[in-house]
Image: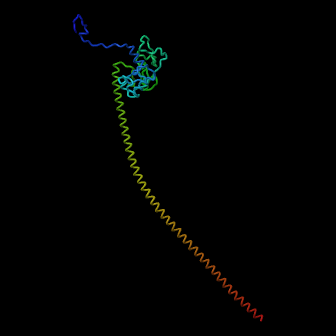
Amino acid sequence: MGCDGGSIPKRDELVKQKQRKAKVDQNILNRVHWFSCALSKKALSSPVVSCGLGKLYNRDAILEFLLDRSAYGDGDLICKHIKSLKDVVTLQLELNPSFSETQAASLTNHDQEPVSRYICPITMKEMNGKHRFVYLETCGCVMSEQAMKEVPSKTCIKCARPYEAVNVIVLNPKAEELESMELALVEKQARIAAEKKEKKKAKANKKELESMNSADSKLLDSTTTSSSKRKLDEATSTDFHKHKKQHTTTTTTKTTSAMSSTHSLTAAVTAKVAEQMAANATRQKSSAIQSLYNNGRVSKENFMNR
């Protein structure tokens, strides 16, 4: 405080006052938010992606961040809610035919009005921060909020894909909107995690049930196989004995037939031999008788000659 040497204190030195927030030029904020990547701070260039908070990023920067989360100094503060590429949506942006590189936004040249690379495909308004823009999570199409209000529909105006109100995300929202969007994003991520956990649990239960059914099926197959094998062995044994019996019977029959044939052949040979012997005996007898007759005739002739 002092008050010596003629110094005169000011009011703000004696009374504590609430500090006023520093005013930031809105044009500079628009150039930062709408013309450059929120992560790398480089100019936006296709492909452009956006998260559930409506921030704009270059896809290449997000890939670098996911591969190395320390690639950007403030990456964990800006993109802490981005865990994978599933957390961002690739935007379908309509190019501005009147854009040229000489009219690109610059943070150093504030006198020149920048021209946006992208426009609304319905109203043809530039996406430069002066108009509110939204995108649809279902398809990634980007358009002005005014176009959606003028053409109310449950399908996308550009690609005709259906969507719901929760799928409409405001790009670069205001501070009060950003808080509610952060809460909605946390709830959404919690719901997705719960659904994923539930699906994983259901998959595990299904796998366990399939394993139990497979074990029961294997046990049933084993029992059936054992029973079938036993029946097959019994049938094989029965067929073997039956075949053996038939073979024995056939062999016996063949032996009997052979013996019968042998006996028949022997009897036939014996009969033939007996017949031959009888014929020989008859022939010898006839010869003896003939000789007797011949001897009598000779004696008679001799007597008459005398």
Asked if residue 275 lies left or right of residue 210, the reply is right
Q: Quadrant of the N terminus?
A: top left
Residue drawn at x 56%, y 72% is: 262
Query: Can residue 95 be seen by looking at this rendering?
Result: yes
Asked if residue 23 lies left or right of residue 251, the reply is left
Q: Nearer the viewer, residue 250 or 86?
A: 86
**Position of residue 274 measured from the top left corner of the image (x, y, whole percent):** 61, 79
Q: Nearer the viewer, residue 131 or 58?
A: 58
Residue drawn at x 37%, y 36% is: 200
Q: Within the image, what quadrant is residue 48 found in?
A: top left
**Position of residue 210 measured from the top left corner of the image (x, y, whole percent):** 39, 42
For the view shown, which residue lies furthest in the right direction? 305
Query: Can residue 125 be seen by looking at this rendering?
Result: no
**Position of residue 195 measured from the top left corner of the image (x, y, whole percent):** 36, 32
For the view shown, which residue lies furthest in the top direction? 6
Q: Quadrant of the C terminus?
A: bottom right
For the view shown, which residue lies furthest in the front direction? 5
